[in-house]
Image (cartoon, grey):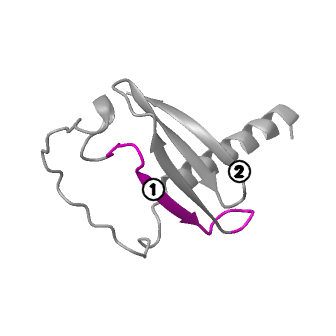
Amino acid sequence: MNPRRFQLIVSCLVLFAVVAACSLSPASSPTGNTVSTAAATNQPVSASSGGGCTNAYFPVSTGTNWAYSSSGSILGAYTYTWTVSDVGNAGFTTNNQYSTGVSSSIKWNC
């Protein structure tokens, strides 16, 4: 058999296999937790304590803390906190402290 012809046949078979595999639908639907979503409410943006950055979905005021924990890290479980500081009309700063001993600051602009 001619090598060029063999290469063409193999290429066509590989292309056919890829197209066939990509067009298959899953055999069954995934199972697991379902997430319900609530309808968004039309709430006004409030800038009372956080300058131009505060709104109903991400409240910002000096001293506000958010605490998080994670168990899915390669390095193991850890916790961290965000503390809001330096709030102004143009932005604010979060000071972040991790249980691993790492700390950082992030300047957010609005």
Asked if the residue at tag 2 contacts the one at tag 1, i.e. Cβ–Cβ closer than 8 Å, the answer is: no
Seen at 86% across and 41% down, the residue is 1
Q: Which residues are magenta?
A: 58-76
Label 1 neighbour load within 10 Å: few <14, some 14-19, many 20+? few
The Cα–Cα distance between marks 1 and 2, rounded to whole angstroms, is 16 Å
* Left or right: residue 67 compared with residue 78: left
Left or right of 29, for residue 45: left
Image coords of residue 43 (percent x, y): 14, 45
Indicate yes or no whether the magenta region holds residue 74: yes
User: Which residue is pictured at 31% across the width and 37% down the height?
Assistant: 50
Q: Does residue 106 appear left or right of residue 15 in this picture? A: left
Residue 61: horizontal and vertical position, in percent?
35, 43
Give the residue number, with chain letter if any, for mark 2: 102
- Rendered-image quadrant of the C terminus: top left
The numbered dot on residue 25 is none
Considering every residue shown, the one lying at the far top of the view is: 90
Q: Is residue 46 above or below residue 78?
A: above
Q: How many marks?
A: 2
Label 1 sits on residue? 66
Task: Please provide percent x and percent y for residue 85.
Answer: 46, 40
Say what secondary structure mark 2 lies in.
Answer: loop
* Amino acid type for the residue under numbered disc 1: Trp
Q: Is residue 66 magenta?
A: yes
Residue appearing at x 66%, y 69% in the figure: 77
